[in-house]
Amino acid sequence: MDEEASHHPPNLYSDVRSSSYIPADKDTEFLQRDELRSVRIGLELLKPELIQREEGIRSTIVVFGSARLQEPATVKQALRLAEEQAAQAPDDRICQQRVVIVKRQLELATYYDVAREFSRLVSSTCQIDGRCDYVVVTGGGPGIMEAANRGAADVNAKSIGLNITLPHEQYPNPYITPRLSFQFRYFAVRKMHFLIRAKALVAFPGGFGTLDELFETLTLLQTGKTKSLIVVLVGRDFWERVINWQLLVECGLITQTDLKLFHYAETAQEAWGLIVRHNGVPTA
């Protein structure tokens, strides 16, 4: 080999093929490393915060409820299908049980309409003259969450959706204001965003997710970590059957005073009235 050629420097641009050459903020594989968890959490906290500031969101109302409670027309159709299948298989216990469950869901489906009406009422009252107060925020999914976002869309108002990455596919409902539709990786950061601007939490019938958010909020109120918001449970019969509040008192696990941390409502107007009286919301 030519001695001069053997001393030629290596290709000066060969290193660009290595991932190490990618700037850290553009290296998505690097950002997924376990060691970068704190960075990801910080970014996940900051991005929605900045966007909400830019959109002028000053205060919110959190609406929780089951993703499985659909509007009455949809549930009626599901019930007809379940009854047809049960009629064709009278000895199939699963089919028979399905009819019972769907009938109960039809009873609860009225809350879809209540959630939609509530959001429509709040949004048309508080989002006027460019103000963005008491903006409805949901988990961004279907069911009661969809109903609440839909109510805001009915009156051309903004609403927020805080979706979460889950093992099974989940997509934001189509009624969220596009600029205010967020996706989270971490439940903890998502929970913080639910309450950062919240003046009220309105909980409709729901399952584990709804109960989780409800009890976390009640704990924050009980311990004095937050004082500014009011909790409204829509559907007293449902909530008193699901949770034996008085038993907790009788066992000394909470006090009678703790039962004043939440209120009951049956209608959209009743729920909004409780919030207005608690926070002194101007309604005109």
Image (cartoon, rainbow, N blue to C red):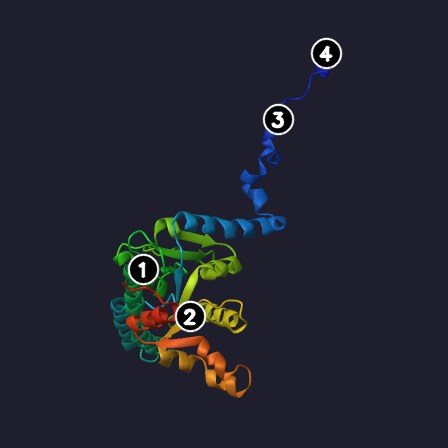
Front position in the image: 5 or 185: 185
Q: Quote the CA–CA distance across marks 1 and 2.
A: 17 Å
**Label 3 sits on what residue type?**
Ser
Name which of mark 1 and mark 3 comes first in the sequence. 3
Classify mark 3: helix, strand or loop.
helix
Whole-number angstrom distance, CA of label 2 to CA of label 3:
61 Å
The residue at which mark 3 appears reads as: 14
- The residue that disc 1 covers is 126
Describe the element under mark 4 as helix, strand or loop.
helix
Label 1 element class: helix
N-terminal-most mark, 1 or 4: 4
Which one is closest to the eye, mark 1 or mark 3?
1
Q: Residue at x 43, y 57 (%)?
A: 163
Q: CA separation, marks 1 and 3?
A: 59 Å
Query: Is 197 on the left or on the right of 99, as rendered?
Result: right
Mark 1 Cα-neighbour bin, 10 Å: few <14, some 14–19, many ≥20:
many
Q: Which residue is mark 2?
A: 230
Label ID, residue 77? none
- Position above or below: 164 against 6: below
Farthest residue in the right direction? Answer: 3
